[in-house]
Amino acid sequence: MDNNWFTLNDPASIDSPALLLYKDRVAYNINLMLQIAGDAERLIPHVKTYKMTELVRMQIMRGITRFKCATIAEAEMTAKAGASTVVIAHQLVGPKIERWAQLVQTYPQVEFVSLVDCADAASAYQVVFSRYGLAANVLVDVNNAMDRSGHPVNDQLFPFYQSLFRYPYLKVLGLHVYDGNFRDADFATRKAKSDQAFAGIKVLLEQIRAAGLPEPLVIAGGSPAQTVHTLREGVHISPGTCLVWDWGYGEGLPDQPFQWAGLVFTRVISKPKAGYITVDLGHKAIAAENPIDKRVKFLNLDNYRCVSQSEEHLVLEVTDWDNWKVGDVLYGVPYHICPTINLYEDAYVIQNGEWVDTWNVVARKRKIAI
C-alpha cells in the first residue's frame, strides 16, 4: 500500500485550507459498498455526506439509482443527477412540504418520498398535496432505539401505520428504520444491539402482512449498521459516509475496510513559539463539534498535540519544530467528514497526485432552485 497516496505533486497549485477528494479511492469505496450489499438493488445510499452531483453519478454508473438525502436541496441535486427515487429522510414541516410538492411537479420522472411519524404531519402532507391532486409518497419513520425521530415501537405503531391508508393523497410505501446509534467497534456487539432493536420491526412487518396491506419497503441503517442489516432478507441499506470515510468511522468500525477519500489540506502559517506551529485549519475549515483531540488526524505529521483552535487557526505542539517552516503543507483526515465537507464550496479532485477537476458541493446550500 502506498503510504504517500495523499501527496500532491504540485501543492503550490492549490490554496489552503482546501478539501481534497481522491477519486480512485471513492471508486474503491463504491465497489466495497456494493460487495457488502450484494447488489445495487439493496442500496439506497445517503448523499448528505458529500452533497456533490458527480458522486451521485459515479454510483448511478454502477447501477445504483435510488438515494436518500436530508434536505430539499440535496433532493433536488440528486434528482438532477439522474436518480430514479429520492427519499428525503426527514419529516417535513412548514414551507418544506410545499417545496416537496414543487419537486414532485418539477421532476415527474423521479419518485420522491418523505417520512411521517405522527397524524399531524400526515394531515399537513394531505392538505398540501390535495391542492395539486398529487400523491405524497411516505415511509413511516420508526424510532427503534435512537430516540431522535420516528414513531415509538409500541402498541400504537401498527394502528398508526394502518391509519395512513385512509388518507387519499398519501401513498404508504413502507418503513424507515435508522439505528445510527449502534457504533460498537466489535461487530458482534453492534449486531446484537441492532438485532434487539429490530425485533419490534419484525412484529410490525408480521402485522402489516397479516392485515393484507401492500408489502412494505424497509430501509434500515447507515454506514455503521450496513454490515448488520445486509444480513436481513428484504431489507435495504442506506450508507453514505462510507463513500469518503473518515477518521471516526475508520477507527471505530474495523470490520469495514473503506479507504479515506476526503482530506483537508492546510499550511503552516506561523511558528509562534518554540515547539508550536499554527496551521490555517480553523473552525471554518473542519468540523469542530468533537473535543479538540478528535477533529483531525494528520497523515504527514507525527508526535503532535492539538493545543487550541479558533475560527481561522489551529495551534499544534510538535516535537520536530525545527523541521517545519512557514508555508509547509499538511494533509489531514477529518474525524467527522460530513459537516467538514459542508464547510467547502468546492472539492479538488485528485488522481495520481494531480489536481484533475473541481466539483462543486452544490447541495451545501439550503436552496438550489426550489
Image: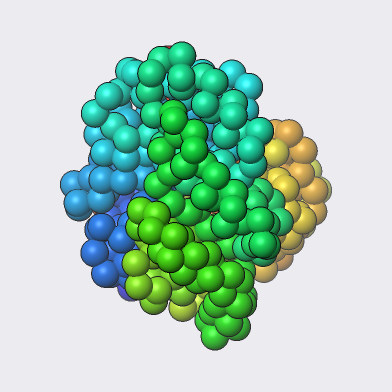
Q: Is 81 left or right of 319, judged from the image as shown?
A: left
Circle count: 0
Measuring 67% from the left and 68% from the top, which residue is drawn there?
303
Query: In which image quadrant can residue 172 be found?
Result: top left
Residue 149 visible somewhere in the drawing: yes
Measuring 35% from the left and 72% from the top, which residue is drawn there?
233
Q: Nearest the camera: 57 or 113?
A: 113
The relative height of residue 75 versus residue 370 in the rendered view (above or below) is below
Here the colouring is rainbow
The relative height of residue 195 versus residue 363 in the rendered view (above or below) is below
- The percent position of residue 141, horizontal first and vertical second, equals 56, 49
* Quadrant of image for the N terminus: bottom left
- The percent position of residue 199, horizontal first and vertical second, equals 56, 74
Measuring 60% from the left and 77% from the top, which residue is drawn there?
196
- The percent position of residue 131, horizontal first and vertical second, equals 46, 14
The relative height of residue 187 versus residue 275 in the rendered view (above or below) is below
